[in-house]
Image: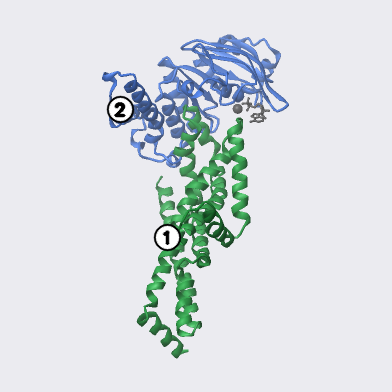
Amino acid sequence: MIDVINLKKNFGEKEVLKGIDLHVDKGDIICIVGPSGSGKSTFLRCVNCMEDPTDGQIIFDGVNIADMSVDINIHRRKIGMVFQHFNLFNNMTVLENIMLAPVIYGIKDMRAAKKAGKLQAKKTRAEVKEECRKEAMELLARIGLQDFADAYPSTLSGGQKQRVAIARALAMKPEVILFDEPTSALDPEMVGEVLDLMRRVANAGMTMLIVTHEMGFAREVAKTVLFMDDGRILETNEPKAFFNEPKNPRLKDFLSKVL
Amino acid sequence: MLAKIQKFIEYFITYRGYVKVLLGLKNTIIIAVIGLLIGIVIGTVIATIRVVPKYKVLPRVLDKFCDFYVALFRGTPIVVQLLVFYYVFFPLIGVQITSVNVSILVFGLNSGAYVSEIMRSGIQSVDPGQMEAGRALGLSFSRTMWKIVIPQAVKNILPTLGNEFIALIKETSVISFVGAADLYAAFNYIGSNSYEFMVPFLAMALIYIILVLFITLLIRLMERRLAVSDRRH
Ligand SMILES: Nc1ncnc2c1ncn2[C@@H]1O[C@H](COP(=O)(O)OP(=O)(O)O)[C@@H](O)[C@H]1O
Ligand SMILES: [Mg+2]
């Protein structure tokens, strides 16, 4: 589904990614670990071109989206992203946060269908909105926050915010979701609820790329774990071998510090 | 003093001085309100151009134009702008325009330059994560700006926009330079007819003060409402 080929990223003179290759299949759950400053966030942000790669290719569903001439917004619809600091829209309620993009794209698709003359696809704006609202409410029920539909983000706890942010990503029915340290900004007692939700999303078959410091979670949920250091992937393995028999000395050193 | 006040009241009422005062008040408010609305539109557009990523040529050219525009309107007194538009620009292009309409236009263009700076700082005060989240959902830069960043920016700068409105109200006292009826013209008229200027100009000062205090009160109320919604949110 995704092929990252020789991805490089410089910030000015500084080489942050020094040639990354990664193949992601549908349903893969890949955890990325590594010391801070090793380029994990930068890598994840290159996958949906939030940062434009300096060199290399990101092949997503057969298209090189690192090419500046492709319309990146079409592809980002299919790539969800969950941030360390949640980044819920402060001026919107929980429900509006989840509905915003689906409504915009629902209306866009409806217009396109009308233009193409597909009569059965004819829906009114109100119908599109109502459909998105229903789906958003179902999502909220799934994350147990249906009572907070009309609340504003500033009244939610960190854990609740991150669950809403995950629901917002799911509402787009993406093919893959990128998580950048989704629990790092949370108070310890809220980490569990977010990891629980991520586990459920994983069990439902979502493809996920997760930067995390939660080694227990990586060991349990990941199909593959990557170790990044200094802009390179130094080790890739299935979780058991990754944690029990690390080969790279830098990984051994890293694991001895965090485990 | 009492005689002067009596004279003023006589001219104010019997000689229908109040009609001119009301007309001046109306012009002051119309010019300030519409001027501010135009200013907000222009200012938002300029501020957006300012913060747009500058990879391509077009945003860079527009940015330079905005620099020029803002420097021009902030670098010259508004009286000069009024005079130039009324006596130079419009006659040159052969367009007839009333002095009130010129004033509305010039106040709009002028406050656009100031509002653009206010709006830019408002946009910069919004967490960049908001733009990131919008873009990550596949929304375009302009859509994210419009739906997410600008509403939060406007909320942050509302008090400053209120100050801009008060500044505009006060600055309308120069529109008589192009012959528009304002408070100065009205009270000057009363003064010239009654040969007594002390009370008319005192009354003019009072009206401006009351107007400004009233607007300040409105802004306070608006801020308090927003604060309430902040707590509830
Ligand atoms: N926008 C940026 N401009 C300049 N340097 C950056 C930028 N983003 C990240 N960096 C640098 O790139 C390096 C890797 O950062 P990051 O990808 O955030 O690492 P990690 O997520 O693994 O902690 C760091 O040295 C950081 O300072
Ligand atoms: Mg990071």
Hey, what amino acid is under mark 2? Answer: Glu
Instruction: Quickly name the residue at label 2.
Output: A131
Q: Are marks 1 and 2 in contact (CB under 8 Å)?
A: no
Can I make out residue B192 in this image?
Answer: yes
SS class of the residue under badge 1?
helix
Q: Residues within 10 Å of mark 1 (few under 14, many from 20)?
A: some
- Give the quadrant of ligand 2: top right
| Circle 2 crowding by C-alpha within 10 Å: few under 14, some 14–19, many from 20 | some
Q: Which residue is mark 1?
A: B30
Q: Residue furthest left?
A: A120
Q: How many marks?
A: 2
Instruction: Indicate left or right for A115 with B146 as reference.
Output: left
Q: CA distance from mark 1 to mark 2?
A: 44 Å
- Give how far across and how far down residue B29 sits, in percent: 43, 62
Q: Is residue A14 above or below residue B124?
A: above
Task: Report whether the residue tagged 1 is closer than 8 Å to ligand 1.
Answer: no
Q: Colour of chain B?
A: green
Q: Residue furthest right?
A: A13
Q: Residue at x 39, y 80 (%)?
A: B12
* Residue type marked 1: Ile
Q: Residue placed at 38% from the left, 75% from the top?
A: B18
- Name the image colouring: by chain
Identify the element where label 2 is drawn.
helix
The spot of residue B102 in percent (x, y) is 48, 57
Q: Which chain is blue?
A: A
Q: Position of residue B228 (x, y in %)?
A: 41, 52
Tell me the subunit letter for badge 1: B
Residue B164 rendering spot, x and y as whole percentages:
52, 57
Rendered image: mark on residue A15: none
Q: Quadrant of the C terminus of chain B?
A: top left
